[in-house]
Image: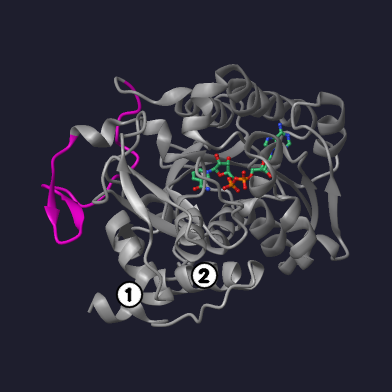
Amino acid sequence: MKVMITGGTGLIGSACCKHFADKGWEVVAVDNNTRGVLFGKDGSNRQNVEEDDVFSRDGVELVEADVRDEKVMKEIVERVDAIVHLAAQPSHPKSLEIPLEDFQINAWGTLQLLELARQHNHDIPFAFMSTNKVYGDYPNYFNYRVVGRRYEPVGFESFDETLPIDRCGHTPFGCSKAAADLYAQEYGINYGMKTATFRGGCLTGKNSRAVELHGYLPYIVRCGLTGKHYNVYGGGYRVRDQIHSSDVAGVIYSFVDRPKKNQIGLYGTPYNLGGERINSVSIFETIDAIEAKTGKKLDWSEAAERESDHIWWISDMGRFKADYPNWKMTKDLDFIFNEIIEYYVKREKLKVEVKDMAYFKRVRV
Ligand SMILES: NC(=O)c1ccc[n+]([C@@H]2O[C@H](COP(=O)([O-])OP(=O)(O)OC[C@H]3O[C@@H](n4cnc5c(N)ncnc54)[C@H](O)[C@@H]3O)[C@@H](O)[C@H]2O)c1
């Protein structure tokens, strides 16, 4: 079996390459390092190709191509047994600077790929990596109160897929991803293709080539370790749920391995995907954890809120778990923080010893 993974050198791409290869699949990873062009050297995923041994494994082919290149993509689509579409302009603040390019990559690139699959390889699974930014800033219209070092919602626990996606601000990124998300659903509903969309929260891991505009957790950890100033946009009580890239790859694999129809017999199901409450953390709690685990004080100050940024987000993965009860999240917050800290300590050759490895287990009893 062979899978095409677009955006294959990225955070989620490299984790998917590994997961599918471990399961015995051949992999065609498509990536043209748009990330390096958009975010500069620090943001480039070329480092993942150099550092991650998955890219030198037999059966893992790296194709340097733009997902919008119809000829190249058609040739690959015809010869694979599944498509995992991850390539994207992934940053919502960046999309405000480049709305046309953002649309071209995220919306047009996805539509063309869906259409190529419909015409040339209709029956294969097609997993599309969407985002919780399709819900725009709708979460900000709920009530929250400060409890300890974080916001807590008043009267609800988390967000499922019934949250409306319109009548709120999105940034161009939220719009282009929502368009792609709806097309992926549409190709399941109207053309019977085996599609699903995964609306990710904060996806994280050491292969995130984090920059200020994308990759919150690894970026703030790196700032803490290297003494770089960190801007806390819109206040530190904001909450995000963190899920490790390997767990995301497990989610996507579960679907590709056994695409499911919904209760009325249609493909195209949207699933929320995140670390849920157990892996949720506020910015202030993140700062506390970095200081406890590294002994270093983060240099930070408050900055104005970013456009359409969520005040608070915790994913409800109930729909996915009901469809795929065998999937379990395997990486907790301590693992996620320790891995990222250890990665940067090694890479930047820092003299920092990681302490308090079980910090979250200790403080959250
Ligand atoms: N990281 C997160 O927190 C997060 C959250 C929600 C959704 N997502 C979504 O998950 C997917 C993967 O995100 P990631 O964090 O791995 O991002 P990433 O930037 O690490 O990976 C995306 C890859 O796509 C490639 N790419 C972009 N445009 C391309 C094009 N036109 N042709 C070929 N390759 C192209 C980039 O070079 C990059 O390597 C994206 O669709 C993103 O929107 C990510």
Q: Amino acid at mark 2?
A: Ile
Q: Could you tell me residue 254's position as x and y percent?
A: 57, 58
Tag shown at residue 16: none
Q: Amino acid at mark 1?
A: Phe
Give the residue number, with chain letter if any, for mark 2: 341
Query: Which residue range is magenta in the image?
Result: 142-166
Q: Is residue 190 above or below residue 243?
A: above
Q: Nearer the viewer, residue 329 or 149?
A: 149
Give the side of residue 296 with respect to residue 215, left or right.
left
- Spatial separation of the CA atoms under disc 1 and disc 2: 15 Å
Tag shown at residue 360: 1
What residue do we see at 23% from left, 51% from top? 237
Q: Quadrant of the C terminus?
A: bottom left
Q: Quadrant of the N terminus?
A: bottom right
Q: Are marks 1 and 2 in contact (CB under 8 Å)?
A: no
Foreground label between 1 and 2: 2
Residue 204 shows in the view:
yes
